[in-house]
Amino acid sequence: MLKIGLTGGIGAGKSTVSEILAAHGAVIIDADKIAREVVAPGEPLLAQLAQRFGEDVIAGDGGLDRARLAAAAFVDEDSTAALNALMHPAIQDRTLEYFTKHSHAEVVVHDVALLVENSMTPAYHLNLLVDVPAELRLERLMSARGMARDDAEARIARQAGDADRYAVCDVIIDNAGTVGQTQERVARLLEDRILPFAANLEAHRRAERGPAELVDPAGENWPMQAQRIIDKLHHGLGNRFTIDHIGSTAIPGLPAKDVIDLQLLVPDLDDARALAPHLAQLGYPGQASEDNLGEGRLEAKGFHANTDPGRAVNLHIRTEGSVGAVFAREFVHLLRRDDDEREKYAQLKQTLANDHTDDGQSHGYAEAKEPYFLTMRRRLVPGSFD
């Protein structure tokens, strides 16, 4: 199952995108709908709310009187905390029931207005943000929902800002145009990324990669993307492993292949083997591999590559203190501080990328850099050559 988080600020048109995804076969789990379900007449939570906040929070029809609940629950921090302590577990349990019910679905979309505000994005393979400029959202709230400007502005201000959403969401869906334009964008997203991602995930198959083409780093946000991936891995594996952004995309100003390289450190290779099935479920299938240390020396590691065709990631599983792990970290540190060495490496990369343009894959390009890396290993990890 490919798990997708879907969000957007109030007035952005998140429901429109949700409907389009559903029309293409995705299962939608609507957080707002669940929040209403768990307080419906006959639900245990309704009685618990009445016990804590008074019987008058029950309306005449047996349902929840939301205005009276708000008046009772938001009078002080303790009351608000009590409300959250009752609501959140009930909503989480019901949400889990829906995910379990649809565990065999190809794509499941969790539609959550406060996905970013509640720090939920690491739990999903992919996060979609329905994006509309704040001024247009304001106009839509006033025209379509009849809100007064002050009310609409206040509601927008209470939600996460654009920068916060961009930092943690993987895909931005522009919904500022017509419904037809949005339908086309979502259809392309499904065809080009979501459905291939789901198929690769199911098959434990890495996404296809292209040739070794270098990208100008200007305008790229590789460190931000790397942090999103690291957060997802920590969510899926726990925080007991160190995960670092390594490779060229970790070095500001350096042209690089559009591939995020990460290094996950484990105590020993038994841990690497134990992690493999968990990583495959998270979208990182892999196998045992080796680092070429030069002069005929090899060092065992795990190598995993991701299943998302829209974001190439290499995940190197190395043991703590290994030559490969120390070199990867020290090489990044060196190029971040040494302008001359960074320029030398940039020129080498460009020359080799040009030489291997017709390879169709990046293997030849990677192998051609090994003599340079051998020299740098002698400089940065000299003890490994004793």
Image (spheres, rainbow, N blue to C red):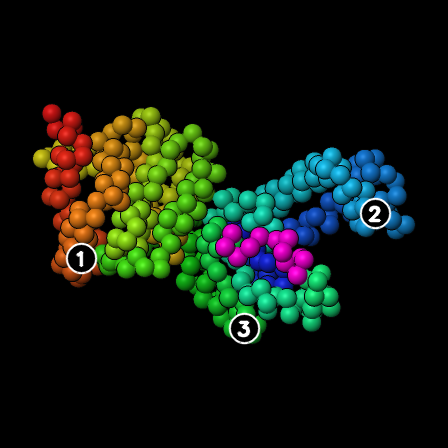
Q: How far apart in space, not on screen, are marks 3 and 2 (Cα)?
A: 39 Å
Q: Which mark is residue 68?
A: 2
Name the kind of residue labelled 3 in the image: Gly
The image position of residue 206, as x and y in percent, is 34, 49
Question: How many labels, in total?
Answer: 3
- Mark 3 Cα-neighbour bin, 10 Å: few <14, some 14–19, many ≥20: few
Q: Is residue 144 above or below residue 74?
A: below
Q: For residue 279, what is the image quadrant?
A: top left
- Mark 1 Cα-neighbour bin, 10 Å: few <14, some 14–19, many ≥20: some
Name the kind of residue labelled 1 in the image: Gln
- Determine whether the residue tagged by mark 1 lies in a helix, strand or loop: helix
For residue 1, say whether it is visible: no
Task: Name the residue beneath numbered marker 1.
Answer: 350
Say whether residue 184 is left or right of residue 258: right
The image position of residue 82, as x and y in percent, is 73, 35
Q: For residue 335, what is the image quadrant?
A: top left
- Determine whether the residue tagged by mark 2 lies in a helix, strand or loop: helix
Q: Residue at x 18, y 52 (%)?
A: 343
Q: Residue furthest right?
A: 60
Q: Which mark is residue 177?
A: 3
For residue 68, say whether it is visible: yes
Residue range (magenta): 153-164
- Mark 2 Cα-neighbour bin, 10 Å: few <14, some 14–19, many ≥20: some
